[in-house]
Amino acid sequence: MSTLDKFLEGDVFALSRVISYVENQRDDYQKLLARLYPRSGKAYKIGFTGPPGSGKSTLVDKLACRLSEQKYKVGIIAVDPTSPFTGGALLGDRIRMQNLTSYQDVYVRSMATRGSFGGLAATTKEVALVLDAFGKDYIIIETVGVGQVELDVANACDTTVVVFVPESGDSIQAMKAGLMEIADVFVVNKTDREGANRIITELESILELKREKEKWEYPLVSTQAINNVGIEQLQSRILAHRKFISENGTLKQKRKMQVKTELKEIIESKIKKVLEKKVFSTLNLDKIAEDVLKGEDDPYSAGERLLDKADLF
């Protein structure tokens, strides 16, 4: 049997091989995705983002355990920083999800950012598609959590959860980072620590303004993930959001936007490859740069001239 046949029969080892094939963008990986695409679209995608050290991995771990105990099949994509030595994921999140090893219907995959910004890896959405096609009911995507503005998760998921801790600092900084705009559910984790009441009060004040403008309640959940406190309430709010956007048509709009974003990224990727093949591989960039430095040319005119010469389209 081929790897794809085994994948279609639910073989976990085949799933791992297919994900590696896609993650490494091997030859014709998009053709493989095209074959799997008709089997996707059923999984519900939940994104977790927030400052480093906020306990996202522990929250994901506890939530996935609950979902699995309720007979749901769960796929987790934990986006980790890239190792400077191997180029692979540092596996920090996977280490913190050891509880999930005993759950057969939970599959955890760590992915390295490999230079991508926005909190996700280059092929996170494609790997989510693979997990969807494999038959997962829920796919949880956890962003890298190294301090970047991690907003891409909102374009990849149906419900976005933003996690804070008492040490997160001024909630105004969260507004500046755009986190308040992308979240559907808010969590203050580690509420047994000093300062929890202050950040909860600050966030509630901001959320009251959002609630006045929109129909969704934007819930704020208090949790102590390591003690399994508040996880049931968190799941309840996520499911409530799913019900809300399913009934008012927002989920359909989100899925359409996700497809449009994916189309744009595919087109941009193909254009980049055409540029590399038709333009950059044949250019003497050193000579052009020297002419610019000498004042005999400028980068803007040179760029226009080279594109016209390449006759890309």
Image (tube, helix red, strand yellow):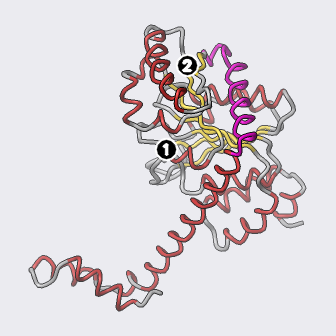
In the rendered structure, which amino acid carries the disc numbered 1? Leu
Residue type (three-letter) at the residue carrying disc 2: Asn
- Residue 113, percent from left and from top: 51, 50
Q: Residue at x 54, y 15 (%)?
A: 190
Q: Is residue 155 above or below residue 199?
A: below
Question: Residue drawn 46% across and 13% down?
Answer: 201
Q: Which residue is mark 1?
A: 151
- Give the structural element (helix, strand or loop) at label 2: loop
Q: Is residue 134 magenta?
A: no
Q: Nearer the viewer, residue 117 or 157?
A: 157
Q: Residue furthest left?
A: 294
x 47%, y 47%: residue = 118
Quarter containing the N terminus? bottom right
Residue 265, position as x, y percentages in the image = 54, 64
Q: To which residue does mark 2 refer?
A: 189
- Badge 2 density bin: few <14, some 14–19, many ≥20, Cα 10 Å: many
Determine whether the residue tagged by mark 1 lies in a helix, strand or loop: loop
Q: Residues within 10 Å of mark 1 (few under 14, many from 20)?
A: many
Residue 245 magenta-highlighted: yes
In magenta, the rendered stretch is 224-249
